[in-house]
Image (cartoon, coloured by chain):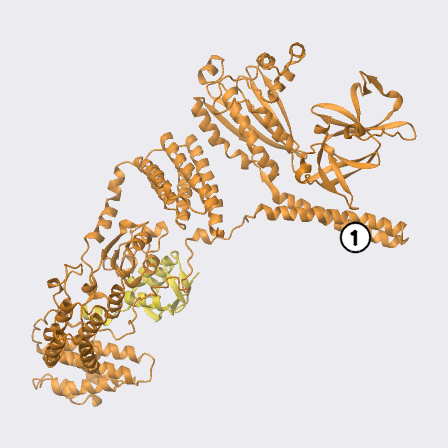
Chain colours: A yellow, B orange
Amino acid sequence: MSIEYTKKSARLTAFVSVEEAEGLLEWLQANPRGKVDLAACSHLHAANLQVLMAAKPNIAAWPEDADLALWLRRALEPSIISLLEK
Amino acid sequence: MSPLLEQFIAEGRDFLQGIGEKLMALEVAPDSVELMTELFRLVHTLKGNSGLFEFPEMTRVLHAGEDLMDSVRDGRVAYSEELADCLLDAMDFVGLLLDEIETTGATDASHAEQSNDLAQLLRALIPAQEDVAEAPTTAATASPESAAPPDLARIPEESRLAAWHLAAAGHTLFWIAYRPDEECFFKGDDPFHQARQVPGLIWGEAVARAPWPPLVELDCYRCLTDFYLLVAAERADVDEYFRYLPEQVAIRPVAPLALVIPEGLPNGGPVYGDFVSEALVLLDADDLAGLVAAAQSLLELSSAQLWLASDLRWLLAVLETSPERRDVLHLLIEALNTLSLPDWSAIAPPVDAGEPEPALAPVPEMPALDAEDRIRLDAILAAQGDILRLPDAVDWLPGRLMAVAATLAACLTNQGEAAEDVAEVYEALAAALAERSARPLRDWLAAFREGAVPAPPADDLAPLAASADDDAKLPASAVLVAAAIVPIPVPIPVPVPVPVPVPVPVVVAGRRALDDPASGSEPKFGRRAEDAQVAKVLKVDQAKVDQLMNLIGEMVVAKNSLPYLASRAENQFEVPELGREIKAQYAVINRIAEEMQDAIMQVRMTPVSFVFQRFPRLVRDISRKLGKEVELVLEGEDTEADKNIIEALADPLVHIVRNSLDHGLELPEQRLAAGKSRLGRLLIRAAQESDRVLIEIVDDGRGIDPAVIKRKAYEKGVIDEATLDRIGDQEAINLVFGAGFSTVEAVSDLSGRGVGMDVVRSAIDKVGGTVTLTSTTGKGTTLRLSLPLSMAVSNVMIIESDRQIFGVPMDMVVETVRLPRADIHTIKRQKTIVLRGRIVPLVALNDLLGVAAAPTANADDELAALVVRVGGEQVGLLVDDFREVVDVILKPLPGELARLTRYAGTALLGDGTVLMVLNPKELFR
């Protein structure tokens, strides 16, 4: 398992495979205020990315992997631009 | 060759075998969903695995096969023999490619055509309704093409500048809209990975295809994310990268000029009029250095977030990379006057950039705020003031400041404030971020509210106005009001025209080292769950097992020297206690060594199914070719024997089965005429009998007619006339094992070349097996093969002759007898003896080996005779003495010595003696 769930947070580590997406989705459904810690994540399967994009959870930590962090910030962060656009 | 590739080849063969088996099974039970699913899974997995490597020819065929199987599985196509033939052909092709990969490490591109043909054949079997089913996909795939032209403005300026420089350095830029198939997750794709790893990636973004549904309705395994990528790469590389999903991407070249989109806060236009005129003069005077200097100094003086700064950065970039583009420079400079996007279409060929920067559209007139909105707005501003008064010493201060700035900017814009004010907010934000303090923003807010908050109508706005005068003493009630009001969505007209350079560290947005794509930090990817399984079966190179085998052989030899040591201790050194202890230790080591040997033998044990599994396909193909109907029955497939034995069995068995099908079984009509069922029956049965494996091949065909055999043999001169009259039916039948014997006139490609049964017999002989053939005319033929379980350890009897010792394989030995010299009679110069009513010829081993010595008799004048069975006959071998029976590891004679066929090989005895093991069959030849 490359996702560790606790009561308040989900910690994604290393490569998060496609099988994890369902669990992540369920957890986010059950814990809408749960925080997602991506620090140790090196890549996540697009299915997981979708779940995060759809759920827009609180991100406790962005990935240490700079490239991934940029991708995820662009996809997940409610940037000032997008706020303004809305 | 990488271990992964090796594994792929090994597994690939297994898969092909499995696919063949399943197809055979489906022939019997064409409706079996289970089989179909399994078959699909095999094809699917093989395809998936092949995708790991660069074997597009293989993948293409497998993909077509997979699609076909998919439609069969869904019941859109019925299973048919034609379909099976097609798939089998395809699998043969894949097998061919596998062979090629194994020898050369790659597939030859020359197979591409064949691969295409096969794939088309397979796809042709998928009915047209498939198209209907695929319609949504087609629609989806069409959409990236027809999608709106690339929205280059969404790319941050840093990335666009980087792309501009790369383009100037000779790279081609492409905009890729990648719309993964909705079902792609089920195919093992990871579009996100695909997008991240695209060659030459400069910038990329994942975008939801449509607004996300509520979480409860989200299907996380349906890919609804699109990816937009800007890359600098060769078109060929990009095509190659997406060659497995070309229908999911739209790749458009991007003219570098299309990237030149200055953006930022439209501020201070007329102020820089001087610069524009000066720059134009410099440009006309061809003083580029002066222009660079002027632009740089102005850039230093300007806030980085301003539109004009962005324009200047582009100006400098163009000056740096392509100063000859005067027209471009001209437009960029003039754009400073209007603060609007230069009209590139005037100078450049129509670029794909599409729409002009929407962010630069003129600010629409804001409707004047009514009183209610003003209250809300003021409350928002007050709340921001509160936030800014919170302690600064927190990690998230930058985020807080940015949030406040964003709010303020939004408020100002909606309030219809001048763009200058908005720019001031960002300047204050930049200052605040720089000093890590909220003060600059707070000061600006205070100043703004001081000046900008219009005098409220005295009555209903009094409390708020009061609070506005002095933020610090905001009454609690006002704070509450503010807090309550803040979440109310302020009606915001769209589109909002103020583009804001994001002051978060997005500066290197997705920029990857172009020159070093394999920069080591690549994450490791598992693929699917089934790959992660821990293998319970080890695939071990046979050489390793053989080495173990050799080592245990040496161990046995070393162990066998202990009894000698024990007897030396007792007799030579006269320490009987030590001798006994050595013997006790020997017993222990002996037991362990034997168990070890046994265990290693078990490792080498292979079930006969290894050979049998090819027969369903073989029988099917041959019988269809011959127009015969054959039911194949396999029994005892799990019977095991040493791998070498099983492997040696493969070719002879194929010969035998072919013979049975070709000569033995009749055509359906002939069978009916003979009163048999149309369906011929071929039984292949394996069983273990003590230390031997018995394999029977039984057919219920026409059998072998001894009369025909005799006549043929006589015609070919194999037997003479006398023999022709004398030999019995069984002997006649055995003539088919003679070299060059064939009963069929016409040589078919199946059998009848006269190299059949003699090859079978010699192959079986080689591994110490025997073949017997029985047949009843009109009823059928039975071939019986008897093989040793293992060749590794041989049970050998040691005999002595002329003071030398020799070994004779125990499976040849019938008995050992002491013969009184008086009982030996000479018939036709051949010494013979009557043993239990049978006449047994006697041959001296010394004569056979060319040793000039007579067999010695014992004290009672008895000769020692070892009765061995050779080719169904018993022969007495006269030797000097018998010794013990030992287990030895028989090693074949090496090199040139291997031609001494009278010896089966050598073995090392416990005392270090080399034992020559005889091969009685050759001895008597």
Residue B374: x %, y % from top left = 12, 79
Q: Quadrant of residue B264?
A: bottom left
Q: Quadrant of residue B158?
A: bottom left
Residue B43: x %, y % from top left = 40, 42
Left or right: B716 in relation to B165: right
Crowd tier of the residue under label 1, counting other residues whose Cα lies within 10 Å: few below 14, some 14–19, many 20 or above: some
For the question of whether residue B494 can be seen, the reply is: no
> Relative to B652, is A64 above or below?
below
Which of B924/B288 is in front?
Answer: B288
> Relative to B287, is B677 above or below?
above
Q: Secondary structure at mark 1?
A: helix
Which of B335/B552 is in front?
Answer: B335
Residue B667: x %, y % from top left = 46, 18
Quadrant containing the C terminus of chain B is: top right
Amino acid type indicated by mark 1: Gln
Query: Pointer 1: what residue?
Result: B585
Task: Please tell me which residue is depicted at 58% across the width and 33% down the height of the picture.
Answer: B649
Which of B490/B922 is in front?
Answer: B922
Kindly identify which chain the residue marked by label 1 belongs to: B
Residue reaching furthest right? Answer: B859
Which of A75/B391 is in front?
Answer: A75
